[in-house]
Amino acid sequence: MSELNITNEDNMALMARYPDKYFDLAIVDPPYGLGNRLSNGGGKRKDDPSRLLYVDKEWDILPTKQYWDELFRVSKN
């Protein structure tokens, strides 16, 4: 049986520790950099118009070219 390790850290720091093509498959959920551009335009909730659907998050930034390059480097697929 393979070993499974779960970490809570910056993906860039984690990927830097691994050699090229180390992972058979990388399944990731990067920030999308959507800001308030959601399907409802970042507007108000329909059930309570005073509540915003989206609150800006400092982590919700577009992934950089460096991020994608590193991801493709460590993954075979």
Image (spheres, helix red, strand yellow):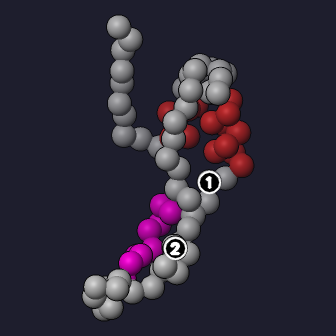
Q: Identify the residue shown where x is 71% and y is 39%.
A: 69
Q: Is residue 33 left or right of residue 43?
A: right
Quadrant in which the N terminus appears:
top left
Where in the figure is residue 45, as x and y percent of width and height?
35, 83
Q: Which residue is mark 1?
A: 63
Q: Is residue 60 shown above or below 43?
A: above
Between 59 and 45, which is closer to the camera in this rendering?
45
User: Most extreme residue toward the left, as rendered?
Assistant: 48
Bounds of the magenta segment:
52-61
- Circle on res. 14: none
Q: How packed is label 1: few (under 14 Cα within 10 Å), some, or many (20 or more)? A: few
Where in the figure is residue 56, as x and y percent of width and height?
45, 74
The amino acid sitting under disc 1 is Pro
How many discs mark residues in the rendered view? Answer: 2
Q: Is residue 44 left or right of residue 30?
A: left
**Image-quadrant location for residue 2:** top left
Quadrant in which the C terminus appears:
top right
Q: Secondary structure at mark 2?
A: loop
Where in the figure is residue 6, as x and y percent of width and height?
35, 30
- Residue 73 covered by magenta stretch: no
Q: Is residue 26 left or right of residue 53?
A: right
Q: Is residue 30 shown above or below 6?
A: below
User: Most extreme residue toward the bottom, as rendered?
Assistant: 50
The amino acid sitting under disc 2 is Ser
Q: Is residue 50 left or right of residue 73?
A: left
Q: Identify the residue shown where x is 44% and y is 68%.
A: 57
Q: Which residue is mark 2?
A: 39
Whichever of labels 1 and 2 marks the residue nearer the N terminus, that label is: 2
Q: Identify the residue shown where x is 39% and y is 86%.
A: 44
Q: How packed is label 2: few (under 14 Cα within 10 Å), some, or many (20 or more)? A: few
Q: Identify the residue shown where x is 58% and y is 21%.
A: 24
The kind of secondary structure the magenta stretch mainly shows is loop
